[in-house]
Image (tube, helix red, strand yellow):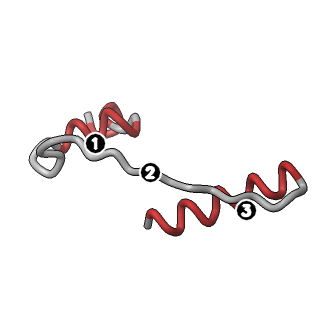
Amino acid sequence: MIKKIGMLARKDLEALLDDKVYLDLYVKVKDKWRQKDSIILNTIGMKEDLE
């Protein structure tokens, strides 16, 4: 999924800039993220959708 996100973002940037782009992605992982679904939902702004 991360690879797909990067590829799509790179293509969008290349179209916007009309030039080739090298995009380097870094992923930051929060401690115990699997046990805390609310962290993920808050981060991507979806927590309100489930309430």
In this image, 22 relative to 28: left or right?
A: right
Could you tell me how far apart the alpha carbons at marks 1 and 3 are, in whole angstroms?
A: 26 Å
Label 1 Cα crowd, 10 Å radius (few <14 / some 14-19 / many 20+): some
- Residue ID at (90%, 55%): 18
Classify mark 3: helix, strand or loop: helix
In this image, 16 relative to 51: left or right?
A: right
Classify mark 1: helix, strand or loop: helix
Mark 1 touches mark 3? (CB < 8 Å)? no
Task: Please name the residue that numbered disc 3 is placed on.
Answer: 11
Give the amino acid type for the residue marked by disc 3 in the picture: Lys
Sequence-first tag of 3 and 2? 3
Q: Up-down: is 47 above or below 6?
A: above
Sequence-first tag of 1 and 3? 3
Label 2 Cα crowd, 10 Å radius (few <14 / some 14-19 / many 20+): few
In this image, 4 relative to 18: left or right?
A: left
- Residue ID at (40%, 39%): 44
Between tags 1 and 3, which lies in front? 3
Mark 1 touches mark 2? (CB < 8 Å)? no
Q: In which quarter of the image is the C terminus?
A: top left
Give the amino acid type for the residue marked by disc 2 in the picture: Tyr
Could you tell me how far apart the alpha carbons at marks 1 and 2 are, in whole angstroms?
A: 17 Å
Mark 3 touches mark 2? (CB < 8 Å)? no
Task: Tell me the tag on residue 19.
Answer: none
Task: Please name the residue that numbered disc 1 is placed on.
Answer: 40
Could you tell me how far apart the alpha carbons at marks 3 and 2 are, in whole angstroms?
A: 18 Å
Classify mark 2: helix, strand or loop: loop
- Residue ID at (87%, 58%): 19
Task: Please name the residue that numbered disc 2 is placed on.
Answer: 26
Front-most of residues 9 and 20: 20
Tell me where residue 10 appears, x and y as whole percent. Answer: 68, 59
> In the rendered image, which quarter is residue 6 located in?
bottom right
